[in-house]
Image (cartoon, rainbow, N blue to C red):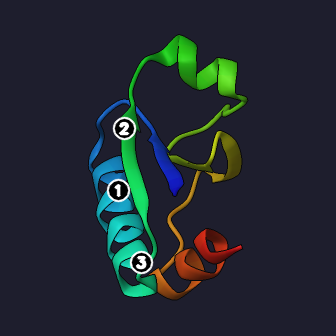
Amino acid sequence: MKKIQILGLGCPKCQKLYDLAEEAAKELGIEYEMEKVDDINRIFDMGAMTTPALAIDGDIKFSGNIPNTEELKKIIAK
């Protein structure tokens, strides 16, 4: 099961990324767990300097932008 983490402080962009990542995971038909990480210290500890950011199984895949659903599916499927 993949752990998909959205790192951000609760801004609209963070929520949009959460929604798009969940949609992408559902379309892929994979087992996944979604988590919102909104603790600033934890976000920095994970290595994200800008938000929103996406991590898969604790590994930051990108930050500071919101890819479209197709790009997210490629990132999540790896």
At 30% across and 41% down in the image, what residue appears? 11
Element type at marker 1?
helix
Q: Mark 1 points at which residue?
A: 18
Other residues around mark 3 within 10 Å, as few (<14) / some (14–19) / many (≥20): many
Other residues around mark 2 within 10 Å, as few (<14) / some (14–19) / many (≥20): some
Judged from this view, the residue extending furthest toward the top is: 41
Quick check: marks 1 and 3 in contact, CB under 8 Å?
A: no
Quick check: marks 1 and 2 in contact, CB under 8 Å?
A: yes
Residue type indicated by callout 3: Ala
Residue type indicated by callout 2: Lys
Disc number at residue 36? 2
Circle nearer the N terminus (1, 3):
1
Residue type indicated by callout 1: Tyr
- Which mark is nearer the camera, 1 or 3? 3
Point out residue 19 in the picture as x, y percentages from the top left corner: 29, 64
Circle nearer the N terminus (1, 2):
1
At 37% across and 30% down in the image, what residue appears? 9
**Number of numbered discs on residues:** 3
Disc number at residue 48? none
Distance from disc 2 to disc 3, alpha carbons, whole Å, reads 16 Å
Element type at marker 2?
strand
Point out residue 2 in the picture as x, y percentages from the top left corner: 54, 56
Compared with 52, 41 (above or below) is above
Distance from disc 1 to disc 3, alpha carbons, whole Å, reads 10 Å
Q: Name the residue under label 3.
A: 24
Which quadrant would the C terminus be assigned to in this image? Answer: bottom right
Circle nearer the N terminus (2, 3):
3
